Structures are given as C-alpha cells and as structure tokens.
C-alpha cells in the first residue's frame, strides 16, 4: 500500500484464474496454427492470427488497464480505463468485504433481475407501447446501466448461461462492495480487501 497526497493507494487484484482455460485454448490454437501454416496451407496463419487476437481481447477487455483505488480525506477514488470517480464519505452508506462466493451471489442476483427487466421490455408490459427500435434502445440502456456497478473492476467477470437462463457468476477473487445512500453501489477488486475496508471505515466514523 502506497500513501500519496490523495490518500492511501490500494493496488488492484489482477487474478485471471477464472479465464485460464481461455488462455490455454488460445495458446493451443496458436501453436496448432503455426505448425499447420505453410505457403500451400495459409489456413494455419489465419488460425494463429485469430488465436492471437482472441488472446489480446481476453487480456485487455476482460481485465481493464489503469485501474486504481485510493482512500483519502475527500473520499474514495476509483479509476478504471479513462473513468475517474470520487465518492465522498457523506454519500456512502457502507463499505463491506465480500468473499468470492458472496460477490458471485450478488452479481447473479443483479444479473437475473436485469435479464428479467430486459425480457419484459421485449415481451412484457414494459415495452407494450414501444416500437421495435425503441425496445432495442431501451434494452441497450438497461444493459449499460446493469454494468455500471462493475466498471471499476480489475478482474474478469463471467456468467454461466444466457439471458433468463443465466445460472451462475464467476469471479477470481474476493471483492469490496460500496453501497451508496441513493441505493446504487460499486463492486471493486482491491488486492487487499480487508485493509481497504478498514481504512474506509476509519474515515466514516
């Protein structure tokens, strides 16, 4: 943990254990493509290129760079990609550590609620007065809003199943859940979850 003028910095967790199989598959396809590649058989080159692109997507899209968390007198600072957000202690209801399975249950519950709301836009009462384009726009906004609590996560997030059939969430580490007084919240993934919660609660007393 490092201390700066903005307070104490908490490095992000960078575990990728829940997508190791994706890295293994990319590596196998890349090697297979190299072995098969020849001037007479360009398919191998395409296979290797596809595996490499998939690896880059897994590396940079599922684990955003530039993630950082800090706690100071002004509040809790969150940073991810190009986004920065300062949560003042006056707007925070609670800060709690969630073990990996607890965080997964929270994510699954929120995901199911969102998928139910999205289905209601297309097939239920919510979208009854909408035309097809309005339904798509409304559903897109709903999906974007559902991702908001995770936009400062530093680890890959995965769900099992699709749409209303989603059956589980998959995280590689313990997390911290910051609940705001307006009912919104952020799930974040500092490496030292216990230390982060202790430091936050010191300022909230």
Image: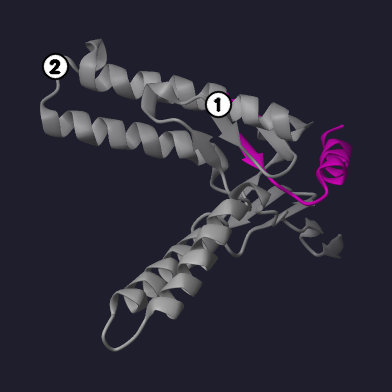
Residue 24 x/y as whole percent: 57, 60
Q: Locate residue 119 relative to residue 16 in the image: left or right.
A: left
The reply to whether the magenta stretch includes residue 204 is: yes
Give the distance between the C-alpha atoms of the residues marked 1 and 2, in whole angstroms.
Answer: 30 Å
The part of the chain drawn in magenta is 180-205
- Residue carrying label 1: 108
Q: In this view, does 180 lie above or below 126?
A: below
Outermost residue to the bottom: 39
Numbered disc in front, either 1 or 2? 1
Q: How many labels does the image show?
A: 2
- Residue carrying label 2: 129
In the image, 25 versus 63, the foreground residue is 25
Picture residue at 55% right of the left edge, 21% below the top: 109
Q: Which labelled disc corresponds to residue 167?
A: none
Picture residue at 73% right of the left edge, 38% below the top: 176
Q: Using a 10 Å C-alpha cutoff, classify the residue at mark 1 as few (fewer than 14 neighbours), some (14 to 19) or many (20 or more).
A: some
Q: Which of marks 1 and 2 is nearer the N terminus?
A: 1
The quarter of the picture where residue 52 lies is: bottom left
Instruction: State whether residue 22 appears in this view.
Output: yes
The quarter of the picture where residue 15 lies is: bottom right
Q: Quadrant of the N terminus?
A: bottom right
Q: Using a 10 Å C-alpha cutoff, classify the residue at mark 2 as few (fewer than 14 neighbours), some (14 to 19) or many (20 or more).
A: few
Residue 150 x/y as whole percent: 56, 42
In the image, 74 versus 116, the foreground residue is 116
Picture residue at 75% right of the left edge, 40% below the top: 174
Q: Locate residue 175 relative to residue 117 in the image: left or right.
A: right
Element class at badge 1 = helix
Element class at badge 2 = loop
């Amino acid at each position: 943990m490092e201390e700066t003028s903005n307070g104490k910095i908490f490095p992000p967790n960078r575990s990728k254990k829940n997508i190791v199989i994706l890295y293994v598959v990319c590596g196998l396809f890349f090697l297979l493509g190299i072995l098969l590649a020849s001037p007479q058989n360009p398919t191998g080159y395409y296979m290797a290129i596809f595996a490499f692109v998939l690896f880059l997507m897994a590396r940079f899209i599922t684990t955003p760079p530039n993630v950082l968390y800090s706690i100071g007198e002004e509040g809790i600072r969150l940073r991810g990609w190009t986004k920065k957000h300062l949560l003042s202690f006056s707007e925070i209801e609670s800060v709690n550590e969630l073990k990996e399975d607890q965080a997964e249950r929270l994510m699954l519950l929120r995901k199911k609620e969102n998928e139910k709301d999205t289905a209601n836009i297309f097939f239920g009462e919510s979208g009854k007065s909408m035309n097809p384009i309005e339904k798509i726009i409304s559903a897109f906004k709903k999906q974007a809003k559902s991702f908001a609590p995770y936009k400062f996560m530093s680890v890959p997030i995965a769900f099992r199943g699709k749409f209303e059939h989603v059956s589980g969430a998959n995280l590689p580490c313990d997390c911290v859940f910051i609940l705001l007084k307006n009912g919104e919240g952020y799930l974040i993934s500092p490496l030292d979850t216990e230390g982060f919660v202790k430091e936050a609660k010191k300022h909230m007393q």
